[in-house]
Image (tube, rainbow, N blue to C red):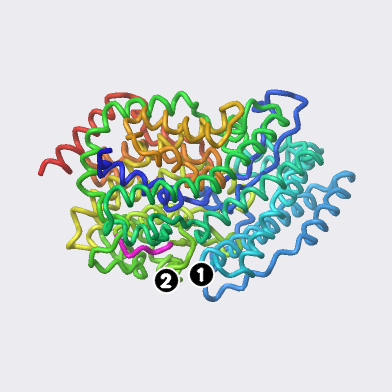
Amino acid sequence: MNKPTVRALAFFIICAFFMSFCSCSIVPVPAPSLSASPSDYAPTPPGHIPASAPPASGSAVPSTTQPHREGIPFSALDIADYDPAALDGLLSRLNALLAEPDRTEQVLELYYAITNEVALYYDAYTIAQLEYYLEPENSEKEAVYSKYEYMDTKFEDDVSLAISAILNSEYGDELAAVINNDKLLVLKDYKGLDDTLKALYDKETELELLYDSYYTDLDYLTVDIDGVTWSWFYFWDNYQNYEYDIYIKAYEALQINENEKLGGTLVELVRVRNEIAAYCGYDNYYEMVWSSNYLRDYTFEDYLTIREYTLKNLMPAYDMLSDRYYPGYYSGDGTDWDMSDFFSELSENPMLTGNMREALSYLSEYDLLLLGGESAYDASYQTKLYTLNQPFVYHKQYDAMYDATSLSHETGHAVNGYLSSLNAIEDNYASIDVCEIHSNGFELLAMDAVAAMYPEKFDVIKRMMLLDVLMCLVDVSLQVDIEHMLYTTDDLTLDKANRLTADIMLDYGMPTEFEDVYYYWSEIPHYSFSAGYVISYVTSAAAALALWLESAQDKNAAMAKFDDLLSADASWSFMEAVQAYELTEIFTEEFYTELSAYIRDVFLAS
């Protein structure tokens, strides 16, 4: 066996960490549209938020129900545990009012009261998640977080039914007139859950939490090789001290062990989700979330166009960047990577424009960056507290270059979170495809400002930030194809998933002479927590790169456009945003050839 290339080894590491690191917690509450359902008689799925992903950023359109910004550090928060009885009382009052005439004012007041109740619920859920991620070994915090996971489906079903009831009443036109996000109006067709769907969603939550427990606690992952007990921690600390055949043998054994737990759980989760989709009249769960959860206005074929041009035109430049700059991405190199002043230093940088600097100053002033220590949950994401109208960023530190690139990604989300102001219900119809332009765009357009914080690493940081976004086109495209395979393969088994993954790897030119390439897919948490999400990294990265390429011609104009996009209505669909900001070239081959030439000339000439 030949030793794997730098890119191959890097890819294996990325598979274990990349998707949770770059994760943004923007997940819309699904509002199934009647037009999206294949059957007029099929029950519609609920507004189900995937585990580990309470909602986040939204639109910049002002809302009459959005509170003023409070400005409270995490350490000073006092978010009460949520009591579902409050929502039950509001729903009872609403049902009584809808039966009476001339109650427009009171009905709208109840709608606003319900949106505020949703904010209280999401905030309690969000805090439970943050506290658990900061201390994942704390059983009490884990129990609180799990409680909200099980509460989620019923809560969202009740709220969706309430809004549907108003929209279908004589007060429907009045409510439609004050809703700031038109996508919310599809709840008019929401029919609610029956006992069968409730049971399926409970089973889904159970499997999500089981996967989460395996993903969080690696204690079960140990193998004995020639008298040495290997864990993942021992492997990454010591593999260079062993002969190649020994550490590859240990790596394979650990992968198989992990795959049996994580992959076996995912295969069962896919089965349950496809049962949900079939019950709701869809061919598979991937089709269901595409139309009902994410309300996408581009097609899977549009994604395939981006993938085709990427693999054909960008791969040589991407491989050169990977081989040259990837080593050391997740390991310390003597540089001081303290991130505690990240927002403060960026807010003072004149390279950034008005909206960015204003948001960063606020984030810095109120210490809205939560840095996790060595035992914290492996993730990096942005979320929002609606009762305070302010974002937070959670980031597990690695004391390596990864910290700078990952925090830059989440900063784009946080700037938009600061500028957005829809209420908690309306916010959940934000397009995650648009929101990921905010994050990928910030990595690219703010790369000079971020790199300036580490002058000894200036050029390397810029190249790594570019590589980070290019990963979203190349490596995440591979992950999209694997996820699509998982949800569309008949009679899926763990062995079949492992072998079909290897076939996809071959299509991407990845090595398959090592058995571990069959197994890594199960380590990507988005497949469990946010099915259908990862494709947003691909489409948004293409749009962000188009904006970045514009900046090569006119930096000021591109920065002004991006600054505006950061405050734009994220309830826009992806194609609406792409057209509004003149980024449609992402569907042409000429763009990818021009981008590749620019990268090679500017970043790889020396």
Most foreground residue, 521 or 132:
521
Q: Crowdedness of circle 2 by 10 Å Cα count: few (<14), some, many (20+)?
A: some
Asked if residue 112 lies left or right of residue 464, the reply is right
Extreme-front residue of the structure: 226
Q: Position of residue 205 (x, y in %)?
A: 67, 49
**Amino acid type at mark 1:** Gly
Q: Which residues make up the magenta segment?
A: 396-400
Q: Which mark is residue 365?
A: 2
> Do we see residue 109 in this rendering?
yes
**Amino acid type at mark 2:** Glu
Q: Are marks 1 and 2 in contact (CB under 8 Å)?
A: yes
Q: Position of residue 330 (x, y in %)?
A: 32, 57
Position of 184 relative to 391 (above/below): above
Q: Which mark is residue 71?
A: 1
Q: Crowdedness of circle 1 by 10 Å Cα count: few (<14), some, many (20+)?
A: some
> Do we see residue 63 in this rendering?
no
